[in-house]
Image (cartoon, rainbow, N blue to C red):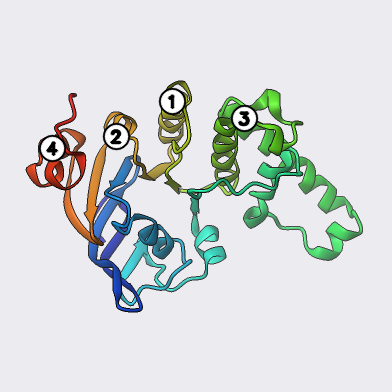
Amino acid sequence: MPKGALLAAERLTKSFGGVRAVQEVSFLVHSGEIKGIIGPNGAGKTTLFNLITGVYRADTGSIRFRGETCTGLAPHQVAERGIARTFQNVELFERMSVIENVMVGRHPRTRAGFISAAFRLAGARREERLIRERAMEILEFVGMGDKADWVSAALPFGLQRVLEIARALATEPRLLLLDEPASGLNAMETRKLGQILARIRDAGITVLLVEHDMSLTMEICDGILVMDYGRPLAEGTPREIQRNPQVIAAYLGEEVVA
């Protein structure tokens, strides 16, 4: 595995019937970076996320994380190894409070068994207290500490997006996959999201980002992979991608002003 690479995908392919959603895709994600994946609708971006997180099994190719093969693992096994994700559509427990949603995210890191939890044994009570404290720390980190007791369904849409990120952070990931986190956000909410992503990176968590908002992607990402019809089209820094003629023709339509 290349030095400094946290995640290495090699020649991933996935077909659905006669349609190849992902074709021979290889790329690296290095520790401490925000890596963007862009491309038109149907380019295979979400399928790629599903392969990394174990939702789909690759037809061919391999995925290595922290030097170990994770190809073919179930989603909960992937999460236990330190990969967390959010989804295009907000997937919260709407009737639960904000802090309870984050506490659910701690499940892969809990130790108390069913019996001790059911009978409220001392160890389970202590662990629950620690889980709540950690969840509150995460909410403060993303700027939602004052919303801890809100019912999640009552949050504005932009804060629901942030809550999803907070819940993913509760798993203590080394790698955080975000699937279109700016979708549906206004300009101010998108700016705040960019600040949160920078804070996450500065906290030592690597980010892999699928996003259609080009302004956010070009501003926040250290490197970008461009996909088109399931294949990698180009890879490089934001400035290199902005100036790549193939990318401009296939996706951006025009050069993005830096």
Callout 2 environment at 10 Å: few (<14), some (14 to 19), or many (20+)?
some
Q: Earlier in the sequence, mark 2 or mark 4?
A: 2
Describe residue 157's horizontal placement relative to residue 9 as left or right: right
Whole-angstrom CA distance, mark 1 to mark 2, is 16 Å
Look at discs 1 and 2 and give the one toward the viewer: 2
User: To which quarter of the image does residue 69 belong?
Assistant: bottom left
- Residue ID for mark 3: 156
Q: Earlier in the sequence, mark 3 or mark 4?
A: 3
Q: Amino acid at mark 1?
A: Gln
Identify which residue is drawn at 44% across, 41% down.
Answer: 205
The residue indicated by pointer 2 is: 214
To which residue does mark 4 refer? Answer: 240
State which tag comes first along the sequence, 1 or 4. 1
The image position of residue 18, as x and y in percent, is 30, 78
Residue pictured at 48% horizontal, 66% vertical: 55
Q: Quadrant of the N terminus?
A: bottom left
Assign a secondary structure to mark 4. helix
Q: Furthest-left residue in view?
A: 245
| Image location (x, y in percent) of residue 189 | 48, 25
Which comes before the other along the chain, label 3 or label 2? 3
Which kind of residue does numbered mark 2 sit on? Met
The residue drawn where x is 7% and y is 42% is 245
Please name whichever residue, 52 or 67, is drawn nearer the observer in this view of the structure: 52
Mark found first going from the N terminus, 3 or 1 = 3
Residue type at the position of mark 3: Pro
Numbered mark located on residue 195 in the image: 1
Disc 2 and disc 4: Cα gap in Å? Answer: 14 Å
- The location of residue 209, given as percent across then percent down, is 37, 44
